Image (cartoon, rainbow, N blue to C red):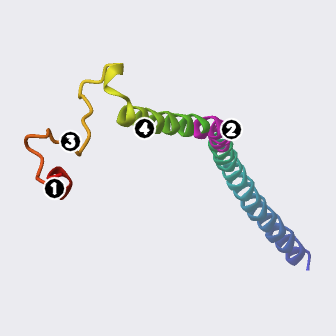
Amino acid sequence: MEQRKLNDQANTLVDLAKTQNVMYDLVSELQERSEELDKRIGTLEDKLDAVTGSLQALPCLISQAITQQQQDLLDGIVHRFRPASLGSDCSWTPSRRRRSPSTAPHTSSDSG
């Protein structure tokens, strides 16, 4: 009977040692995962900071783009309708020219 108790105690010690090893492995794995998770969270925070910075700069960039488009539009309108006397390279000529009396077609009012 005494031998059986000693065997049971020995088995219990072996089981405790195995359990301790399993627990140590689990704790080690949890620490590794925790470190990996901390790195990933740090990366996400950096990316979030970059996105936040971009979003904060967006209103200014939109304003600049709209201002540039408006300026380009106004420049195009001014260039299109600028009189020749203001120094444009092309002189403006009306699409319909007045004919001189010698080349004008004869009308009934000319026979008078």
Cα separation, mark 3 vs mark 2, equals 58 Å
- The label nearer to you, 1 versus 2, is 1
Q: Which residue in the rendered view is the most extreme toward the bottom?
A: 1
- 84 inside magenta stretch: no
Is 37 displayed left or right of 13 in the figure? left
Q: Position of residue 59 (x, y in %)?
A: 65, 39
Residue of label 1:
107
Residue 55 in the magenta stretch? The answer is yes
Residue on which the image places disc 2: 56
On the image, the x and y values in percent for residue 105 come to 11, 52
- Amino acid type shown at disc 2: Gln
Q: Residue at x 36, y 28 (%)?
A: 83
Q: Reading the chain from its start, which is encountered first: label 3 or label 4?
A: 4
Label 3 sits on a secondary structure element that is loop
Q: Which mark is residue 77?
A: 4
Q: Which residues are magenta?
A: 48-62
**Residue 15 horizontal/vertical position (percent):** 78, 68
Residue 85 picture quarter: top left
Closer to the chain start, of discs 3 and 1, is 3
For label 4, count other residues whose C-alpha is less than 10 Å away and answer few (under 14), some (14-19) or many (20+). few
- Left or right of 2 on screen, residue 104: left
What amino acid is found at the position of numbered circle 1 in the picture? Thr
